[in-house]
Image (spheres, helix red, strand yellow):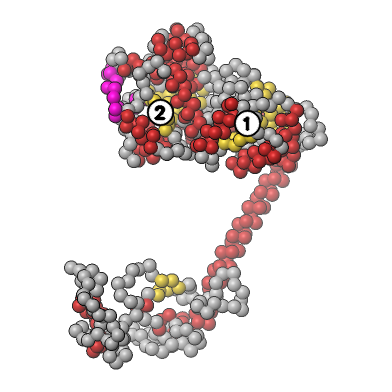
Amino acid sequence: MTFNDFRLAEPILRAVEAEGYEHPSPIQAGVIPPALKGRDILGTAQTGTGKTAAFALPILHRLAAGRTGKGDRRGRKGPPRGRGRSARALVLCPTRELAAQILDSFNTYGKGLPLSQTAIFGGVGQGRQVDAIRDGLDIMVATPGRLMDLMGQGHLDLSRIETVVLDEADRMLDMGFIHPIRRIMGEIPPERQTMMLSATISREIRVLADDLLHDPAVVETAPESTTAELVDQKIYLVAKADKPKILIRMFEHGDMARTLVFTRTKYGADRLVRILKKAGIKAEAIHGDKSQGQRTRAMNAFRTGKAEALVATDVAARGIDVDGVSHVVNYDMPIEPESYVHRIGRTARAGASGKAVSLCDRPEIELLRAIEKRTDARPVKGEGYEDLTYEMPADGGRAAAREAKEAKAAAAKARFGQRSGRRQGHKSAQAGGRPSGSSGGKTRPDKQTKGDSGTRSGSREGGSGRPNTPTGKRKSSTSSASTRPSRDSMNRSDGWSETGTGKKKHRKNKKKKFPSKPVPGAGGKPASKAGKVAGKRSGGRTGTGGGKPGGKRPAGGRGGPRRRGRGSDSR
């Protein structure tokens, strides 16, 4: 079978022939015919077998047919050309690098067609992406996060989408994009063509496929979690502290001109790059904390050969499509067995051969066993480096894994105990009337002491301070146990409040129109509440005569004209 048997548009066939492709891969031969008829697709294939072309070629052919007026699968012509037309095909993928690579494939296969396409992803400014949307699109390749942002800003209209592709759907679900995917699919008309393709199909993917796909054509060209046959897999049992040493020796003695190294964490990737550079090995790191400019420069350096090693995390594994990768090194064993398939799938692409090397510490042997159980991977023990490697334990590493789990649990328990102790100490300090972390014999003068707290609580039941009288009026008496007046003896207008006996005081977050303390009258008596209210309405401060309005201002008081909005009722 050749690509001519699919009866694709002539410009598409010329572009495929220019790329040197004559015979389709198994996934392409299984997906393209039903996709051209408009059926939903659920496809499973190994990494590097041409899944992008499997959905890109049918989309280009169907859009080109709609543009020329031959009608689409629902029997209507495509939208008119020109500024402001909405996209008719949407491809969702998990990473920026994968979005850029898919866009390159559409540009390559559709360069002879009057179609426009763009990529939408985060990490860069959205200005150019918004301009491309306003100018009109036919194909849109996007990551879910940035697509949701532009949808929320009102820049996107998905009402004319006819074909949706979920590429690497399992990775998008692992990254927590299940809810954005459902929201995006809810904005697309139900009469659509949906294609889901991935290297592995998990139970969650099958549940999502049951909700989104209608009578799909299931294409499985390889069993789930199947590794490529042309990858030579080896494993070295080495301690964690010796992993940098053995990796540097591999670069010094082996032909590793273009090597992809995978770590478990972003910090580990940056740290390994520093170690390799110190040893004279040109290396770059790529992970989620890098800006898009840094990631692009790292990828270009790796493609052009300026960097011998590219250190990446599992998230970036799905977006790295570089020809000629000779080695893949699992510096840290993957936690998920399926990630092992995607990692080593970066080499031996398009029929080429490659090597995969795994560095396994004693606590990671259990992860190796899970990989061998869930996949068909059977890495053999590598030769050499006997001074750094060790033999497989008699118990298969179970004791080391158990000790690592116990140490991790003990460390977590210790951290929890420290946090609990700090919280308990903070509560005890507050109950004792002193700040947390201070010594028992020292107290801050501006904080309530334990004795003051007891005095205050006693004053509420008939002691000094505020008596328990029916009128509830304040008296001027204060507690003799403290040099500072108790809270209840302070005027309410001073802005202080209290959450409870013996607890920390705080000020109310309330903007005041007048000074916190009332201006005394002629006899030195505080102005009454009625006088203050009347003073607000009259535009001035309270006057003489026990706060009655209309009195003279006290000597030295503020004068000036009456101001509306602050000192008077602006109504």
Q: Secondary structure at mark 1?
A: loop
Residue 420 covered by magenta stretch: no
Q: Amino acid at mark 1?
A: Ala
Residue 76 covered by magenta stretch: yes
In this picture, which residue range is highlighted in magenta?
75-89
Q: Position of residue 433 (x, y in %)?
A: 53, 76
Q: Quadrant of residue 194?
A: top left
Quick check: 84 above or below 516?
Answer: above
Q: Is residue 566 left or right of residue 293?
A: left
Q: Residue at x 36, y 31 (%)?
A: 132
Q: Is residue 312 visible?
A: yes
In terms of sequence position, does the residue under pointer 1 or pointer 2 come before the other?
A: 2
Q: Residue at x 52, y 12 (%)?
A: 20
Q: Which mark is residue 307?
A: 1
Asked whether 317 or 431 is in front, the reply is 317
Dot 1: within a 10 Å radius of its alpha carbon, few (fewer than 14), some, or many (20 or more) residues? some
Q: Amino acid at mark 2?
A: Thr
For disc 2, the marked residue is 118
Q: Secondary structure at mark 2?
A: strand
What's the distance in space between the residues labelled 1 and 2, CA to CA? Answer: 29 Å
Dot 2: within a 10 Å radius of its alpha carbon, few (fewer than 14), some, or many (20 or more) residues? many
Q: Position of residue 510 (x, y in %)?
A: 35, 68
Q: Is residue 370 left or right of residue 78?
A: right
